[in-house]
Image (tube, grey):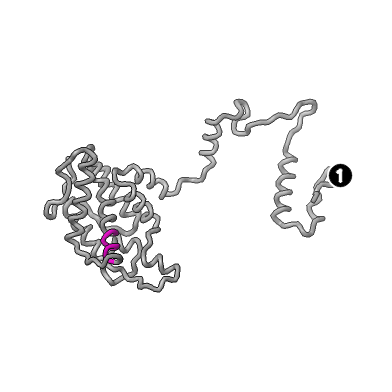
Amino acid sequence: MSFWLPGSGRWDLHSERNAEPAAIAEIQDVHNKIRTMSLQAGTRDRRVWVPDPDKGFTVRGAYDWWSRALPPVPAIQGKARALWKLKVPLKVKVFLWLALQDRLLTKARRARWRSQESELCVLCNEDRETTFHILCECKFSCSLWARISTAIGRNFTFNSLDDMWDVGQQLCNTAGGGTRQLVAGAVVPATTWVIWRTRNGVIFRGHTAYVENAWEDIGGLLHEWGRCLAGASHVGVVGDQLRLGS
């Protein structure tokens, strides 16, 4: 297919009736770009790296150009940078990454695939089991977050999954340095991980969910992770108190 009229110096953009409108638009765009070019007689053609015509192509220059050309980083990618730096097991990082993207295999999500099972949350039997519900607003989960709020002296009520993450990061950023900061950053991962494991235990093993058991599990994880991080033996749960180390 040719849109150039020999000897006329112009493009024929209307003779091809079967051409798609998008193709016509692309040809028109090429035509407009050619018309703006300034050609110099008696000079040889040469390749030019448009981002830096003087220095030409370099790997560094290509990287800088590509970085500027990329769209703004989505919020979830910004969270990912902090998430992957958390001092928690990889499986917990992956779990939390899926949770923040609302990709956990909850009952509500399974219902999209025409699953015939009930969508009710197995921890409260009152509302649809979405990621936000099971981790943040279920009565069972709220009981755990309330205990953490009392133990740490910080509000752990959330309006969204992003809110949950932000509160956890604020706790980490204000905990000071050393082991205390590392363990503070693990509070939200440990709590959500225990909630999800408790939920799975009810569904797949017929367990009964007890807030007290989950509370002790959270303390156990923080104790284990804190000890692995810096040999801190004074991290965990003592009664209703949550110790983050020092």
Q: Residue furthest left?
A: 239
**200 magenta-colored:** yes
Pick the front one: 2 or 72: 2
Residue at coordinates 29% horizontally, 51% vertically from top-left? 189
Q: Quadrant of residue 196?
A: bottom left
Would you place residue 16 above or below residue 55 in this image? below
> In the image, 18: left or right of 209?
right
Residue at coordinates 34% horizontally, 56% vertically from top-left? 161
> In the image, 93: left or right of 29?
left
**57 magenta-colored:** no
Taken as a whole, is the magenta stretch helix, strand or loop?
A: helix
Instruction: Give the residue at mark 1.
Output: 6
Q: Quadrant of residue 140?
A: bottom left
Locate residue 136, reporting x and y percent: 29, 60
Residue at coordinates 84% horizontally, 47% vertically from top-left? 5
> In the image, 220: left or right of 65?
left
Q: Which residues are magenta?
A: 196-202
Locate residue 200, reporting x and y percent: 30, 62
Pick the front one: 123 or 149: 123
Locate residue 195, reporting x and y percent: 27, 59
Q: Residue furthest front?
A: 205
Locate residue 46, reporting x and y percent: 71, 29
Q: Amino acid at mark 1?
A: Pro
> In the image, 97: left or right of 38?
left
Pick the front one: 31 or 222: 222
Would you place residue 109 above or below residue 219 in this image? below
Q: Tag 1, which secondary structure? A: loop
Q: Quadrant of residue 53?
A: top right
Which image quarter holds the C terminus?
Answer: top left
Q: Residues within 10 Å of mark 1 (few under 14, many from 20)?
A: few
